[in-house]
Amino acid sequence: MTSQSYPNLCIHTMTNKPWDLKTAVQKYQDRGIGGISVWQNVVEPIGVAEASLILNASDLEVVSYVRGGFFPAASRHDREKAIAHNLGMIEESAQLGAPVLVLVCGAEPTLSKQANEDQICAGIEAILESAAAHQVVLGIEPLHPMYADTRSAINTLGQANRIAARFASPWVKVVFDVYHLWWDPNLEEEIEISFKTDVFGTYHICDWKVPTTDFLTDRGIMGEGCIDLEQIDQLIMAQGFDGYREVEIFSEAYWKQDQDEYLDRILNAYQVLY
Ligand code: ZN
């Protein structure tokens, strides 16, 4: 193991979308980054076996695999399809050595909020045994309410905490993403609850640009936007968090730029802040 300049930093491969897995692994390792979170789109073209060889040969720790979820659907057939897909993703996570499968839980706009939540819980219940057998944590990621129509009916840390705690399983946790949660007036209290109930899982960082030109693919580098990243980080670290800070930036603008320069900007911003 070579010495790492950023041992507690992890980058999501989607951050450098133009790079394939092999390139991303090489670039992250060269810069002394500690961890990598792998998105399925970089695994698909080469297959899980090849992807896991690439990851195993590196010094990077695989932090999570992204993403499962999307449980709610109007028909039973589609809900069963979603469960089958998630079972496959759990197996892939285990093969890749990823201890966490991130769940973007989904939402079906023709259903009520409660029905969506019930279907999400039923979906998690249906895959929990497999998650435990493969030792893969299911990470419920609450998404900003602007995505409540089709992407996730779980929209606050409080809601995610309650759902995760209901399972009372070491294999169900919460994924905390500053982009989705920064606005919440109950954040401090809910972070405490998350740790007290032992459901805090992993931690994603980026920034909310002002103005934001696209609500999916215009995320900012840390320090570029309005999120009080320092304060949120203090709240999380005060609870004894010792996992990775995972940079997850979706940005059409940055994906068009030189990815090496962009990654160096991320590292500079990280050093300034953390
Ligand atoms: Zn995230």
Image: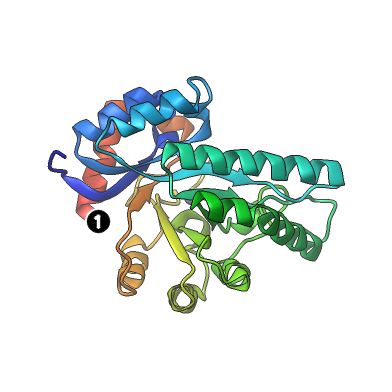
Residue sitting at x 48%, y 31%: 252
Residue sitting at x 32%, y 45%: 10
Camera-nearest residue between 274 and 59: 59
Query: Mark 1 near ligand 1 (CB under 8 Å)?
Result: no
Relative to 173, 83 lies left or right: right
Determine the residue located farthest toward the top in the rendered image: 45
136 lies above or below 58: below
Residue sitting at x 58%, y 57%: 144
Disc 1 marks which residue? 273
Relative to 31, 231 lies left or right: right
Count residues near mark 1 (Cα–Cα under 10 Å), then give few for <14, some for 14-19, many for 20+. Answer: few
Camera-nearest residue between 12 and 125: 125
Quarter in which the C terminus is drawn: bottom left
Q: Indicate the position of residue 210 as horizontal and vertical percent values.
A: 46, 50
Residue 214 in view of the camera: no
Relative to 105, 197 lies left or right: left
What's under tag 1, amino acid-wise? Leu
